[in-house]
């Protein structure tokens, strides 16, 4: 997920910088409560609860990005109440949705790790033009890709590490093409909160996006209703989302006011993104890192040593509390055959064990 540093002013006039994750599929600006307290932002209404977290509305802040003042008035904003919202190595303190940047051109140069915001028309377009219209109510850009000769609508989703699609679609493609690699259990790059281990994974040999071909693209299933006609407000229906495993190979410019994007492709193959030990991870209510399931294609060595329900205490001598799924899955990835040394807790006992990195898909 692209990380952007925004500058705010405290009530005393001093500057406060914070890292925000840019999520083109996000619904509203989310600010960590500690950051909001630093800035003197107050709640403007009653708090609501969603997925166990509490959020309170607030006024969208004005920020400085580089030397430019940026208004986020096109988006709603919420305070995340309680613990820090975003615990990662980058210390993210907020979520920046695409809707907040509707008046602007946004450039995410993934290979160069550069992020640009500019008034529409101020950045010279680079690359090939593709349509990415959105509805003002949501700010969610819709694109079209082609798989196996058929066009599909997808959300352009900078907030997802991996591309996703309706389970029924992936299963039908797999049934039509039994030689396409597939597996169950969203681990490694595909790990996601609340994973059950029952997710269906499919490696699609070629995806066409505008004039570009991307080979060996991993898609992870989501329940069909996640991408129902009412789940995301887009100009036409979508069946999934194009995520970071594809976007990382592009310079992506989104010209929101014109509903278009411009692409420059830096690499064409997305197939080397699932080398991991194959543990489906989750974080429980106490912030413990739990193994929910084992990938169907994990090594027999790993399946023998690690069991669903195990709590991971330590990885290769590193202990973090709380863990987050991105850092944990990265720590369990590496070259095929690499051995990861783990300290786990099972039935109240601490056990030193190992797991082996495999090419899962």
Image: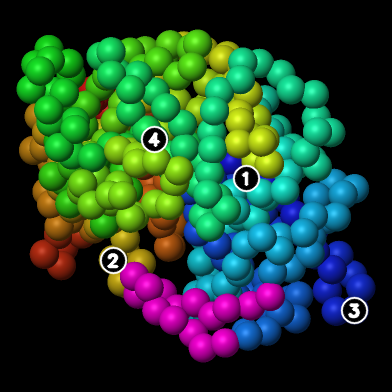
| Marks 1,4: beta carbons within 8 A | no
In this view, the mark in front (3 or 2): 3
Instruction: Tell me the magenta residue range.
Output: 45-59
The disc, 1 or 4, on the residue closer to the chain's N-terminal end is 1
**10 Å crowding of disc 2: few (<14), some (14-19), many (20+):** few
Confirm whether the magenta stretch covers residue 49.
yes
Mark 4, residue position:
154
Q: Name which residue lies at 34% across and 70% down.
A: 51
In this view, the mark in front (4 or 2): 4
Q: Name which residue lies at 28% across and 66% down.
A: 284
Q: Secondary structure at mark 2?
A: loop
Q: CA distance from mark 4 to mark 2?
A: 31 Å
The disc, 1 or 2, on the residue closer to the chain's N-terminal end is 1
Mark 3, residue position:
12
In this view, the mark in front (3 or 4): 4
Closer-to-camera residue (34/278): 34
Mark 2, residue position:
284
The disc, 3 or 4, on the residue closer to the chain's N-terminal end is 3
Residue 3 is marked as: 1
- Classified by dominant secondary structure, the portion drawn in magenta counts as strand
The image position of residue 88, as x and y in percent, is 52, 53
Q: CA distance from mark 1 to mark 4?
A: 22 Å
């Amino acid at each position: 997920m692209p990380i952007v540093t925004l500058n705010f002013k405290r009530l005393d006039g001093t500057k406060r910088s914070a890292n925000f994750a840019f999520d083109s599929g996000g619904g509203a600006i989310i600010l960590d409560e500690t950051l909001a307290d630093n800035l003197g932002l107050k709640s403007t209404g009653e708090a609501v609860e969603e997925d166990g977290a509490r959020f309170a509305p607030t006024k969208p802040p004005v920020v400085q990005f580089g030397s430019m003042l940026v208004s986020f008035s096109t988006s709603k904003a919420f305070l995340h109440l309680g613990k820090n919202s975003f615990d990662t190595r980058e210390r993210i303190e907020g979520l920046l949705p695409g809707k907040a940047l509707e008046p602007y051109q946004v450039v995410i140069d993934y290979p160069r790790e550069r992020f640009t915001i500019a008034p529409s028309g101020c950045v010279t377009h680079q690359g090939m033009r593709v349509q990415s219209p959105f509805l003002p109510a949501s700010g969610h850009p819709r694109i079209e890709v082609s798989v196996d000769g058929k066009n599909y609508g997808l959300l352009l989703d900078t907030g997802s590490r991996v591309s996703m699609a309706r389970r029924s679609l992936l299963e039908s493609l797999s049934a039509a093409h039994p030689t396409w690699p597939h597996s169950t259990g969203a681990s490694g790059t595909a790990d996601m909160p609340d994973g059950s281990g029952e997710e269906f994974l499919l490696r699609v040999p070629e995806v066409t996006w505008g004039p570009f071909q991307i080979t060996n693209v991993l898609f992870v299933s989501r329940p069909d209703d996640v991408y129902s006609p009412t789940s995301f407000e887009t100009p036409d229906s979508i069946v999934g989302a194009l995520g970071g495993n594809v976007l990382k190979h592009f310079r992506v410019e989104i010209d929101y006011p014109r509903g278009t994007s411009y692409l420059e492709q830096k690499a064409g193959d997305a197939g080397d993104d699932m080398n991991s030990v194959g543990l489906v991870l989750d974080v429980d209510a106490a912030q413990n890192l739990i193994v929910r399931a084992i990938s169907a294609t994990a090594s027999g060595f790993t399946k023998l040593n690690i069991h669903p329900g195990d709590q991971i205490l330590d990885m290769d001598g590193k202990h973090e509390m709380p863990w987050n799924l991105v850092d944990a899955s990265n720590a369990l990835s590496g070259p095929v055959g690499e051995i990861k040394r783990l300290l786990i807790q099972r039935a109240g006992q601490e056990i030193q064990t190992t797991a082996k990195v495999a090419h899962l898909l």
